[in-house]
């Protein structure tokens, strides 16, 4: 076994399967909550340059962990025959709903201010935040026994929470419901791309290389999404997609509405005085 293979085997180290609200999950929630609060408070008055840097750093961390995940999932070592092989796991192709913020954050970091950039920011602070929160809270489906992968999924989805709360707390997201229109368009584009990818991939490979189900909305496989899995058998596929889009848009609207309400709550004078000593 080469040194490289030894490193990969080490990176595939196992742990007991993490339980939802077990010690691993609670530790991840605590770390993400702490980082979120720190960044939201420390950079609530950040300028455009600081926002670009923060988004670039978060996206870079997610991309590094994503590369690790793809390598670990593709490498196989048989301790009996002492042989290794590489087989790409197409089900793990990084184009799910929660993958999109990882690609959009660097775009925000390089784009000049304008309608397109603002729409992406609005998406990250609403759709992206909801996606991260949902997985961080209901983490059971994403936990596996590979230590690094469970860490990766918490880092990835936790980063969405950090990024979304930061963009909301610093008022980089527009606090009006017109903002939801641009955010929804940003959401619909990768949804349509995932449908095209699912259909094209099935026409190319069928099911011979495993399940390819981007955004969990392939017409050929069941969805793993809560609620949507119950709706899928009851309606035609185009209707299912429309319900999917409408459902996610509603949840993003709830995130935005909650943020608007919270932003209008005025802290007491005593709180303002005490908090001024934090930094």
Image (cartoon, rainbow, N blue to C red):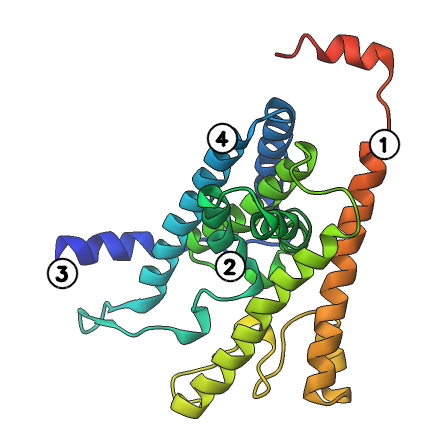
In the rendered image, which residue does mark 4 sit on?
49
Eyeballing the image, is 243 above or below 121? below
Answer with mark 2 or mark 3, whichever residue precedes in sequence: 3
Please tell me which residue is depicted at 69% across the width and 85% down the height of the picture: 238
Spatial CA span between label 2 and label 4: 24 Å
**Do labels 2 and 4 touch, CB within 8 Å?**
no
Considering only order in the chain, which callout, 3 or 4, is on the residue closer to the N terminus? 3
- x, y (%) of residue 188? 63, 68
As drawn, is 136 to the left or to the right of 153? right
Q: Is residue 214 visible in this depiction of the protein?
A: yes
Q: Is residue 45 left or right of residue 150?
A: right
**Residue where numbered disc 2 is placed:** 99
Tell me the residue that label 3 is attached to.
Answer: 1
Estimate the spatial distance between the alpha carbons at disc 3 and disc 1, rounded to whole Å: 61 Å
For the residues carrying marks 3 and 1, which lies nearer the camera in this image? 1
Q: For mark 2, does the 10 Å Cα neighbourhood hold few (<14), some (14 to 19), or many (20 or more) residues?
A: many
Q: CA distance from mark 2 to mark 1?
A: 32 Å
Disc 1 designates what residue? Answer: 264
Element marked by disc 3 = loop
Q: Nearer the viewer, residue 10 or 69?
A: 69
- Please identify, in this view, whether the residue under mark 2 or under mark 1 is nearer the observer: 1
Q: Earlier in the sequence, mark 2 or mark 1?
A: 2
């Amino acid at each position: 076994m080469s040194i490289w293979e030894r490193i990969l085997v080490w990176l595939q180290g196992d742990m007991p399967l993490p339980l939802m609200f077990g010690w691993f999950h609670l530790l991840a929630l605590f770390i993400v909550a702490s980082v979120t609060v720190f960044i939201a408070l420390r950079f609530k008055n950040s300028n455009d340059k600081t926002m670009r840097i923060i988004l670039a750093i978060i996206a870079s961390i997610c991309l590094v962990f994503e590369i690790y995940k793809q390598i670990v999932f593709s490498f196989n070592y048989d301790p009996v025959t002492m042989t290794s092989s590489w087989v790409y796991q197409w089900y793990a192709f990084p184009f799910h709903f929660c993958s999109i913020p990882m690609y959009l954050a660097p775009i925000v970091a390089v784009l000049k201010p304008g309608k397109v950039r603002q729409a992406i920011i609005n998406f990250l602070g609403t759709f992206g935040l909801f996606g991260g929160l949902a997985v961080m809270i209901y983490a059971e489906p994403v936990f596996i026994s590979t230590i690094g992968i469970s860490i990766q999924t918490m880092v990835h989805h936790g980063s969405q929470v950090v990024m979304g709360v930061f963009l909301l707390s610093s008022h980089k997201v527009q606090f009006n419901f017109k903002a939801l229109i641009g955010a929804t368009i940003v959401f619909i584009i990768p949804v349509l791309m995932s449908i095209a990818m699912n259909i094209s991939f099935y026409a190319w490979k069928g099911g011979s290389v495993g399940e390819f189900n981007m955004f969990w909305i392939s017409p050929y496989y069941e969805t793993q999404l809560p609620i949507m899995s119950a709706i899928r058998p009851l309606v035609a596929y185009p209707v299912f997609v429309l319900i999917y889009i409408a459902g996610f848009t509603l949840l993003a609207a709830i995130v935005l509405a909650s943020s608007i309400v919270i932003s209008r709550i005025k802290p007491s004078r005593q709180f303002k005085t005490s908090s001024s000593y934090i930094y």
